[in-house]
Image (cartoon, coloured by chain):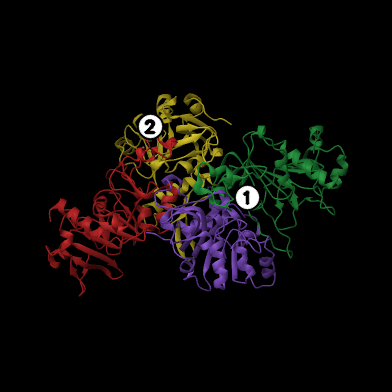
Chain colours: A green, B purple, C yellow, D red
């Protein structure tokens, strides 16, 4: 699957697993695209760890919105941004709060799903997505809290780095969190981390199960419940 | 007690080597006017506590560009190449924490708690050299409280005694920083009279604010 | 998701033996309508977590009068003679905490922290049997996080999805309780449409509220 | 000094030590009377641990006050109460917040003075004011946090219980807090707890220093700086 199409397919597939009422936090990069497939009728709320519930998809003029009621709050450069520091809109019923509250909601298990990109993930659900020793230092941001606290951790990633598998027996890079990941979404399928290892829930029929195993370091569990990804996830990407 | 002062007066006691908390998230919601003045005053050897090191020309990031920071305690430095470069060169000390731990460490400093009992960072490099504690059979990491000499925060609206309300993404760590510092300077977008803010819409209480300056320095 | 339900529906899953947090301070700001219903339903053997045991006929205190409480975790029982009497008679278990520790223990339960690192209670009976921890050479007491099956809280105004704003002395432990319980019932004085509350005036976020009932049960 | 007059004298004397900008928390009982002597021009703020800064002296109709701007907040029985659960008013610039924030302000040293009554206090500044073993259980409420966290702990108490001294060498009742008290105000004078013991700062000239020592178990430090309480504190009580 071509890379850009793969990204959109993964995003759409994840959106399909978001249930009404879910509070969802999207990491930067690949995960951000999930919001493109979240429609209003899905009743899903977006969480920004910088202190917002109800992040909107598109940036509308938040300043104009408040001019009516609370003139005193209209300050030229007070914006709503998402966790990637990009200007964002808000949806109806949105709320603002401070970082301590925001991460309280995360650690307290009130965020139903966090979607994160990764460099490595392994069969114990360990995830490594914040640093490569000897390379440019970035910082973990909110990833460790999200991995530890969110009710469900979804990984959105290309199946391989292009050179080598990303789904490993054991992560080699410094971990972001241990035993954290619930499900891995790639262009090749949907993979649940279970106590016995990584189980293929469904796969993209463009690939054979053998091809998928070949692109994966961890031994995949393939049982009689495995299905192919429903065709509608490949449409209107 | 009217706390509105000139920007020069507000920062007059900020000295070389001070520990300073600066609010904002990726520079958004940062006290830009106070940061301007800090750059102009050229205070050196700052230990900076902030969410992230901002960008080159926005937010607390400007202090790196001007080589004013000796050490930064934050959760992200990636988006500011200058902070990354100085760290690689060994001229900038960097202490990174999970953002949620950082938030509680600042709050703990302001609210008289010794530290934070969290699972964030367990089983990672973050736990190295730190105390752990077991509660009801579960293991947690202990992250120590943070305090500062000065907090520089921004709010959209405030009254002249320092009660204030944040808006949008400007909230972030500001209320905790206001509590965790010896001296808090509040930069405000719109200044109102005492009594104009309703008691239930005040996010940070006047007692945590020591000086108020107007955005733009008017 | 409109969460407004009848009072009967809201409390249908509250069972004998449940751990229940109830907001209010001396009964002020308590969810009186929900308490009414709980008295009528006569749920027994409750472990109650609240600021204080209220008074005989006001707030959570009414549950003592009706002998529904097996154990209470709070900071004051003095003003309710029934709770004091039952404690003396050995029919009511009482666990007392400094009010500030209690506040943080509830918040910790709701916000995924294992406990509280505080000096309150050091050198007193409160420290008996508890862990201590030393941070930067100073000794602190560790108080464990509290969680509950249900939180019953009250707010002056809320929208139909559960965003709410407290007023006056009704705030107290309510926001922390909403986070610390599996199922939170919000009693509201004035119900408004979604969007009527401004994002910055919301004290407790909709995701923490599971059911909404109207004060008076209308 | 007659008991009721003594209470008013103590309250007025304490009010005289409150400085502009102070945030002050008054305990129930004797300390509450301090607010009677706090005038607006003193620029002192009152803290209620139930979540208020700017508690007013008299109960005015808080409901009426908000009717203009925020109609939706007008609920019949939403009141402002003080920590003694009595209806209270608020002053201009008042703010409301939750208990976690309120005790954060206390523990964090943002309350400049707490005024507490007591059963016992000793020369190390230990204080015992919340329980008598074997007697009716009350609960410590916010007293332990206030004693531990407030910048200055003032004790407002009658000098003796009527039967025996309250200022002891060592508290016998279970402590509320250790090394907490800064100053003790009684009808006999003002007593600072120092590293060397309890020092008489000033005394009520109705008593001799010998009489005061006789009513005190702890050995008092009396040096050349001791004065009598200024006469204006005895006026307009």
A133 with respect to B182 (left or right): right
Label count reads 2
Q: Position of residue D152 (x, y in %)?
A: 33, 61
User: Residue D171 lies in what quarter of the image?
Assistant: bottom left
Residue under pointer 1: A81
- Say which residue appears at 29% left-offset and 60% top-offset: D18
Chain containing the residue with disc 1: A
The quarter of the image holding the N terminus of chain A is top right
Please provide percent x and percent y for residue B73: 59, 63
Pair 2/1: label in front: 1
Q: Residues within 10 Å of mark 1 (few under 14, many from 20)?
A: many
In the rendered structure, the answer to whether residue A146 lies left or right of residue C86 reads right
Task: Identify the mark at residue C63; answer none if there is no mark.
Answer: 2
Picture coordinates of residue C195, whole percent (x, y) = 55, 36
Can residue C48 be seen in this snapshot?
Answer: yes
Residue at x 35% of width, y 44% of height: C76
- Asked whether residue C128 appears in the rendered view, the answer is no
Identify the image quadrant of the C terminus of chain A: top right
């Amino acid at each position: 699957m071509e890379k850009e199409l793969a990204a959109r397919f993964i995003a759409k597939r994840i959106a399909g697993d978001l249930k009404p009422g879910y509070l969802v936090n999207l990491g930067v990069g690949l995960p951000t695209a999930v919001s493109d497939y979240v429609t209003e009728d899905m009743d899903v709320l977006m969480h920004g760890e910088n202190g917002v519930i109800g992040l909107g998809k598109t940036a509308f003029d938040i300043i104009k919105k408040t001019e009516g009621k609370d003139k005193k709050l209209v300050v030229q450069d007070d914006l709503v941004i998402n966790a990637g520091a990009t200007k964002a809109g808000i949806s109806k019923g949105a709320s603002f709060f401070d970082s301590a509250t925001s991460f309280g909601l995360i650690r307290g298990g009130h965020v139903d799903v966090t979607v994160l990109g990764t460099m490595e993930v392994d069969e114990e659900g360990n995830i490594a997505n914040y640093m490569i020793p000897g390379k440019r230092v970035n910082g973990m941001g909110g990833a460790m809290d999200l991995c530890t606290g969110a009710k469900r951790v979804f990984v959105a990633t290309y199946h391989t780095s292009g050179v080598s598998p990303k789904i490993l027996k054991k992560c080699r890079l410094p971990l972001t969190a241990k035993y954290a990941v619930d499900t891995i979404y790639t262009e090749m399928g949907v993979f649940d981390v279970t106590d016995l290892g990584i189980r293929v829930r469904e796969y993209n029929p463009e690939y054979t199960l053998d091809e998928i195993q070949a692109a994966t370091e961890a031994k995949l569990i393939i049982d009689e419940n495995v299905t192919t990804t429903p065709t509608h996830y490949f449409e209107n990407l | 007690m009217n706390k509105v002062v000139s920007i020069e007066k507000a920062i007059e006691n900020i000295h070389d080597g001070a520990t300073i908390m600066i609010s904002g998230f990726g520079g958004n919601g940062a006290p830009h006017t106070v940061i301007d003045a800090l750059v102009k005053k050229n205070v050196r050897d700052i230990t900076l506590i902030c969410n992230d090191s901002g960008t080159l020309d926005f937010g607390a990031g400007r202090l790196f560009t001007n080589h004013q920071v000796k050490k930064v305690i934050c959760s992200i430095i990636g988006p500011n190449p200058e902070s990354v470069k100085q760290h690689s060169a060994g001229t900038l000390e960097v202490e990174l924490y999970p953002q949620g731990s950082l938030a509680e460490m600042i709050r703990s400093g302001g609210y008289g708690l010794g530290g934070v009992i969290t699972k964030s960072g367990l089983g990672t490099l973050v736990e190295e050299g730190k105390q752990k504690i077991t509660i009801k059979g579960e293991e947690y990491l202990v992250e120590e409280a943070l305090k500062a000499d000065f907090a520089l925060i921004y709010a959209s609206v405030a009254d002249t005694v320092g009660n204030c309300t944040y808006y949008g993404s400007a909230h972030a760590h500001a209320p905790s920083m206001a509590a965790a510092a010896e001296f808090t300077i509040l930069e405000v977008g719109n200044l109102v009279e005492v009594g104009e803010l309703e008691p239930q819409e005040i996010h940070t209480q006047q007692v945590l604010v020591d000086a108020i300056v107007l955005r733009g320095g008017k």
